[in-house]
Image (spheres, coloured by chain):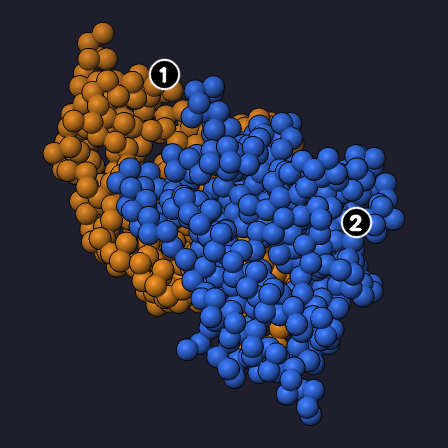
Chain colours: A blue, B orange
Amino acid sequence: MNIPFCKPYYSGNEIKYIKKAMRSGKLSGNGKITQKCQEIFENKYQFKKCFLTTSCTDALEMSALLLEIRPGDEVIMPSYTFVSTANAFTLRGAKIVFIDSRADYPGIDESKIEESITPKTRAIVPVHYAGIACDMDKIMAIAKKHSLYVVEDAAQAIDSYYIGKSGFKRPLGGIGHLAAFSFHDTKNIIAGEGGLLVINDDRYIKSAEIIWEKGTNRAAFWRGEVDKYHWVDIGSSFLPSEITAAFLLAQLEILEEIQERRKKIWSCYDENLQNLERKNIIRLPIIPKYATNNAHMYYIICRDVSERGALIAYLKRNGILSVFHYDGLHQSEYYKKIQGCRELPFCEKYSDCLLRLPMFYELKLRDVERVSKQISRFYDSNRKK
Amino acid sequence: MNIPFCKPYYSGNEIKYIKKAMRSGKLSGNGKITQKCQEIFENKYQFKKCFLTTSCTDALEMSALLLEIRPGDEVIMPSYTFVSTANAFTLRGAKIVFIDSRADYPGIDESKIEESITPKTRAIVPVHYAGIACDMDKIMAIAKKHSLYVVEDAAQAIDSYYIGKSGFKRPLGGIGHLAAFSFHDTKNIIAGEGGLLVINDDRYIKSAEIIWEKGTNRAAFWRGEVDKYHWVDIGSSFLPSEITAAFLLAQLEILEEIQERRKKIWSCYDENLQNLERKNIIRLPIIPKYATNNAHMYYIICRDVSERGALIAYLKRNGILSVFHYDGLHQSEYYKKIQGCRELPFCEKYSDCLLRLPMFYELKLRDVERVSKQISRFYDSNRKK
C-alpha cells in the first residue's frame, strides 16, 4: 500500500553483465566494460572524453584537481546544492562563493554571478537542479569575459538539454569545460554509487587520464607508449570496478525507456496539481524556454516550512514518502565557521518550502493520482480549519 | 597452457548477494551489507571501528583528512610502495619523507625512521609489503616517543599478524592509530575495486563517520540523533555501493579457505626454489620472527635489472607471466620535481631485482613446480653461456 520516494529499476541485464565481467578475470577499473560505457556516453552526447568515476563527488574532485584549484582561489556556485559541489573545491583550499537561487526556479541566479567575481575567482559551477538547465549561454559568456572555467554539476541532469538562442539543442554536461554526472541510487540511471567526468576541453584529457589512474601514466603504459608507469602527478583512485561499470551498462541500455516513463509520471503530477497552483496554494516546477525536462524530479513549493512539515507528516500517515531537499550550504555550521554568514533569500525559501514527491520508473499513474489527491485533501482540510 | 600472474577466485555467492542487494531496493552506500562486512572485520580482528571504502587509496585519503594533515606537515613512509601511499598525503599538502627498505626485506627500515623525524613530522606510514609485518613494536615506540600518528598501509596484509616481544599476536591493521586495506583484484580477497579504513583510536570514530559521508552528519541523522543532516566538515564520498559490499561479503565467507590454499602455493614455491637460493643465485622472501605469512605474494630477488628482464622474457616465452613491482617513489619524475633527489640503495635494489611469481587460489601445485623449473632452467642455461 505504501508509496516509497524512490525505487531502483533494473533492465534485467545487470547480473548477466556482472557475470560476464567475472568470467573475464578482470574486475578492477578501466577494463573493457568501463571503456564501453564511456564510449556510449561519448557517442550519444558528443562529449569529447568521458571517465567513469566511483561517484559524482569524485568527478567533481577530479575537476578541482584538473583546474589546479589552490588555497585562495574562489569558486562560484549556488548555495542550494548537495554538499559535494562545495566539498570538492573546499578540499583543494578554495573559498566558496555562494550565489542565490532564481526566484522562479532553484537553479543559480545567473544575474548575480558577475557581481561576485573577483580577481581570485577561478571557476563557476552551475548546478542543473532537478535536471533542468541553468541558462548556459549567459554563464558561458560571463566565464569567457572573465577567463573563468565552468564545471557543470550535472548530477541530476542525464539526458537533459539546453536550447541556445539559435535554437540549437546541446546536452547538459557538454557545454562547460568539465561536467560531472551521478549514478547514485536516486538518479534516472544508476550504479548504486557511481559517477562520470566529462571533458569538453581537449587540454584536460591527458591530465585527466593521469589523475584518474592515481597520478600515474598507467594509461600510456597500457597503450605501450612507455615501458613502466610512474608517479607523475597528484591523483587518486577515481576508477570504479568493472562490476560497477557492468551494472551501469545494463542501465544505459534502457535509458530511453526510463526517460519516456519518467516523463509520463512527471506530466501526470503536473496535470493533477495544476488546480492547486491556479489557486496559489502551491507552486509547481517551471521548465524555462531554454531547457528540456529529463523528469529527474517532481517537486512542489509550499508556502512555508511549517506547512511543508505538516504536509510531509500527512502524506506519511497516508503511506506516501515525500522528502525535502537541501539546506542552503551558506547556512551550514561548517561554512558559517569558515566564511561567516550571508543571506540568500530564495535559496532559503527553497530550503524551507520545496518538497519532492515519489518519482521512479515503476510508480503507477494511479499512484501519482493518489499522491496528488492526498495533497489536495491536505490543503482542503487545512482551509476548513 | 599459459599461467597468468593472478586470477580472481569466487566463492559462488557473489551473484546471490548482489541479487539480494538489488531486491532490497537500496544499492547506495552504508546499507545493511556494508554494515555486515564492517562487523565481520571488527569481530574477526577486534578492530575498533571499520569503514568500507571505494579503494585502499580512499582509505588512506580518509586517514590524511582525519589526521588533519596540512601543507608543511611531514609524513614518513617507505619509498618502495604503491603511489597511493604517498598521494593520499601529498593531496593534503604534506611533504613526503621517504625511507629506505631493509636489507633483508622490502619493508621500511625501522632503524632509519628516527633520524628522519623533524618538528614538522606528523605521521609514520609503515607498509606491510607482501602482507609481511613491519616491526610494529619498534615503530609504535618511536611514534609514542615523538607524539606521531601511525597509519598502517595494510593494502596487502589481510589476515596477517605481528608477534610482539611478549609473544602476543596482533592482526596487522589493528596496531596503528589507523589502517587501510585493499580489495583490489590482485588481493587475497577482492571486490574489483574496494578498501577498508580501520580506526583503532576512539577519538577518530565520530569524525570518520562524517568524512566518510561527504562531510555531513548523515549517520547521526539515520540514528535519529539530529532532525536534518548538514555540512559539518570537509569530506568526500568514500562509501562503496551495496553491490561492492555484497561481492566482498561473499569473499569474506571463504577467507580461511583462500588463505589455506595460498599458503600451500607459497610453500610449494619456497621448497622448489630453495636450491637456487642455496647456490646464491636468487634470494627468496624472508618472514621475520615477528611476522606471520598471509601468502599474498611470492617473490624472488634477482641479481640485477638486466637478469630480471631476461628472466621475465624467458618465462613469458614459456607461457608464464611474472611481474616486477614498484619503482621507488623517490625516483619518480613527480617527486624529483617537488622534493629533489635522494639515494635509497635498498629500495632501488628491490625496484630493479624483485620479481613476483604467479599467485592465485586456482594455481595448481604442478604449475608452481613448472614455474620453479623454468626459473632453474633459465639460470642453468645462463650459466652455460
**Identity of the residue drawn at 29% across and 37% down:** A24
Q: Quadrant of residue B247?
A: bottom left
On whether disc 1 and disc 2 are found on a single subunit, the reply is: no
**Identity of the residue drawn at 24% across and 56% down:** B13
> Which residue position holds label 2?
A110
Check disc 2 and report its element: helix, strand or loop.
Answer: helix
Can residue A373 be seen from the camera position used here? yes
The answer to whether residue B74 is left or right of residue B264 is right
Can residue B29 be seen from the camera position used here? no
In the displayed structure, would residue B169 be above or below residue A124? below
**Identity of the residue drawn at 26% across and 58% down:** B16
Q: Which mark is residue B306?
A: 1
Q: Quadrant of the N terminus of chain A?
A: bottom left
Q: How many marks?
A: 2
* Closer-to-camera residue (A67/A364): A364
The answer to whether residue A309 is left or right of residue B371 is right
In the displayed structure, would residue B101 be above or below residue A307? above
The answer to whether residue B107 is left or right of residue A141 is left
Which residue is farthest bottom?
Answer: A385
* Closer-to-camera residue (A243/B103): A243
**Identity of the residue drawn at 35% across and 42% down:** A27
Pinpoint residue B73: horizontal percent, then vertical percent: 66, 47
Name the subunit of mark 1.
B
Q: For the residue marked with disc 2, what is the amino acid?
A: Glu
Q: Quadrant of residue A267?
A: bottom right
Badge 1 crowding class, 10 Å Cα cut-off, few under 14, some 14 to 19, many 20 or more, is few
